[in-house]
Amino acid sequence: MALIVQKYGGTSVGSVERIKNVARRIAKWQNAGHQVVVVVSAMSGETNRLIGLAKEIQKNPDPRELDVVASTGEQVTIGLLSMALKAIGKKAKSYTGPQVRVLTDSAYTKARIREIDAHRIRNDLEEGNAVIVAGFQGCDEDGNITTLGRGGSDTSAVALAAALKADECLIFTDVDGIYTTDPRVVSDARRMDVVAFEEILEMASLGSKVLQIRSVEFAGKYKVPTRVLSSLTDPDIPVEQEANSGTLITFEEDPKMEKVVVSGIAFSRDEAKITLPHVPDIPGIAYKILGSIAEANIEVDMIVQNAAKNGLTDFSFTVNRNELDKAIAVIEKEVSPYLEEGGILSDASIAKISCVGIGMRSHAGVAAKMFKILAEENINIKMISTSEIRTSIIVDEKYMELAVRALHKAFGLDKAPSSME
Amino acid sequence: MALIVQKYGGTSVGSVERIKNVARRIAKWQNAGHQVVVVVSAMSGETNRLIGLAKEIQKNPDPRELDVVASTGEQVTIGLLSMALKAIGKKAKSYTGPQVRVLTDSAYTKARIREIDAHRIRNDLEEGNAVIVAGFQGCDEDGNITTLGRGGSDTSAVALAAALKADECLIFTDVDGIYTTDPRVVSDARRMDVVAFEEILEMASLGSKVLQIRSVEFAGKYKVPTRVLSSLTDPDIPVEQEANSGTLITFEEDPKMEKVVVSGIAFSRDEAKITLPHVPDIPGIAYKILGSIAEANIEVDMIVQNAAKNGLTDFSFTVNRNELDKAIAVIEKEVSPYLEEGGILSDASIAKISCVGIGMRSHAGVAAKMFKILAEENINIKMISTSEIRTSIIVDEKYMELAVRALHKAFGLDKAPSSME
């Protein structure tokens, strides 16, 4: 007997029929002798409906009150799912975030979980209940309702699994696992059976939206074995089969770990590049530029400063494409007066491509191989940034698909890794 | 400065526009220097939508889980109304029932309030907030979400007013007060400026549906001055005018009290009559009949047993019309074997008419006058039942409107009472 946390997103509980299917899936795991705790999102579309109502009332809804309104979506789902389980003869009990209690800080609309009281859930499990918990929500020390931000139900699930020391956390979603890259861009993209926590963390931060990044951080911190798998399969497929499907995120040097250097290729069109050519190469100039950007609450991703020539240097960085205009306005106001010449160059038609793999730790030359492959395709690299297990480059947006396909093939990601055969 | 509790029902908060109007009304009271606590229902239609979803999942929804689902309707309204107040520059803070905390018993879907912690609300009021509380809901000692049953928001409002020792509880609704009888039946029906608690209690129990009867009981127990008034007026009418509109429910022999014998005429088509003719007039026969009915959870309203003749008597009682078939089935099964002859007679085409007034305490002859008026209209009286401040009769349903109009006129209810002139 294992203790399993299962998470179902908005699409998986998007209709009465789908909720009934989820109940069947849960009952199957209970019937196989497992204790099941379930975390659910709001029915798809519901959170947007609620936020829409709020915006009709107040253009920028008060964050505390927005959380009061938005958290009702998950509360409806937990009640309905518990009923669906009772309707097929199973014991079930639902809890809102504040009831559990999922204690968070007071940062409304983007709260962070501090602790979870697992006591009550354990009692209910002992009594044979499936315990259904509302994702995305909690309360602060004063009992105010908080929400965790978009995708927060993933974090709720992993945090609950950590608090309960669950054997595994299953994230049921509308894809059947995590792929070496986006299958819509590369038809040869391959589902990974196992992926390292650090890899998924880099991919999530690079725009692969299968899991909320904070849930991955949580999983890493508490070493919660987490599996991403499909909720669109027949709910009655055998438990043993389902338990081995999807992609498992691991935290150890797992013997099952794929023996490859690059595990996946992530990419994103979300960024834009700003270049300040010929800025004076003096101490404090980077702070002058990036400090003003940070004060305007604009997040900076990649930063490159070239070697100086004649006391002048080129300074480039990327921001979210939505914030490009805002960033330029800040620089024109705060920084331009200190620049001697050159003005501001910007480019919103760029894409970021990243090769990710913990194998890169022990293998040099990934960056070099990456550049060679792109050179062979005549793709110019505009910026480069690396971490221990990741090499990212910026290219012209129009070359993105070509570059991703070439890299995916060159690093052998279209073939099952040898250790798995 | 007064502390005022205001309650707005589902129609009053049924759209974004109406919620904004409610906010303006509240702001007006705040601007006049009053502290305002507001209790709201779910937006009209929302509770039915949620219950409908639940019934699609489970034919007879689990009561605990139904309360989890149904209580979200009010939670949405409190958040939206707080935003609407903030949008016009007022301070506001919302609370769910469990947050306040409205402590109830554990009778899901029909819980009763045990106590309310007014501490938190008082602090928020001191800080200049309008405090917006979700009606209809609370939690039990274990923190399980409970609801108070249909119309429960009235009870939430009066209970909060009692806990806060509020100066007045204003029940805003889609009628402009309580009438001497239903204006749809009697065009001369007159809005009462003041009505005694006992009278409204009798009227509520007789089918006048302006207030939930439990809210009236609560108001009586804690002597909460409660006013029923319209939410459909211009939200910006002066506070002094609004404060004196509608109908005030009082608990003392108020000097403003109308000096009349009969204050109002209530009526109902909800009942049906069962007669067991010629039952043996022996001890225990009433228990035999009514005991079996009570065991089947059927509520009995009026009961009449005629004088015995030859050791036999006629026994009649009324039940809710919806339960007539069920009641007959019970009697056929449990009682018939003990009856010597006569069988079961039933009549679903009846109506109950009641004259209500605390003036009846000190005035004999109301019943006699009632019978005389009906005799003059050739209306036969089928059953009679009286209490200290009420006389009820059963007549053929087809005579109901005629009887109500005749009584309303004969007791002078179409004219403003002399003490008010």
Image (cartoon, coloured by chain):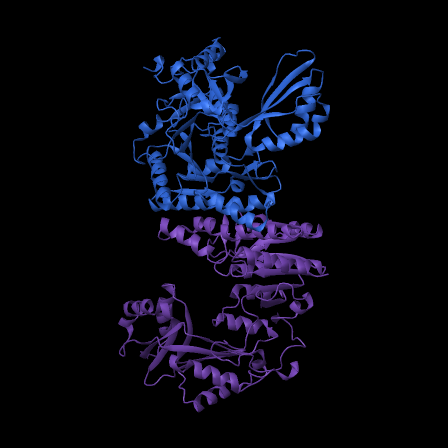
Chain colours: A blue, B purple
Instruction: Judge whether B306 appears above or below A367 on screen.
Output: below
On the question of residue A411 being in view, the answer is: no
Q: Residue furthest bottom?
A: B376
Query: Looking at the figure, which quarter contains the N terminus of chain A?
Result: top left
Report x, y in % for residue A254: 42, 16
Query: Looking at the figure, which quarter contains the C terminus of chain A?
Result: top left
Report x, y in % for residue B360: 56, 81
Which residue occupies 47% across, 15% down?
A358
Which residue occupies 40% across, 78% down?
B304
Which residue occupies 71% across, 52% down?
B126
Instruction: Judge whether B267 appears above or below A323 on screen.
Output: below
Report x, y in % for residue B269: 41, 74
B371, A374: nearer the viewer: A374
> How many numbered dots are placed on residues in this image?
0
Instruction: Judge whether A20 appears above or below A392 on screen.
Output: below
Report x, y in % for residue B212: 51, 65
B158, B327: nearer the viewer: B158
Instruction: Judge whether B407 appears above or below B302 on screen.
Output: below
On the question of residue A257 being in view, the answer is: yes
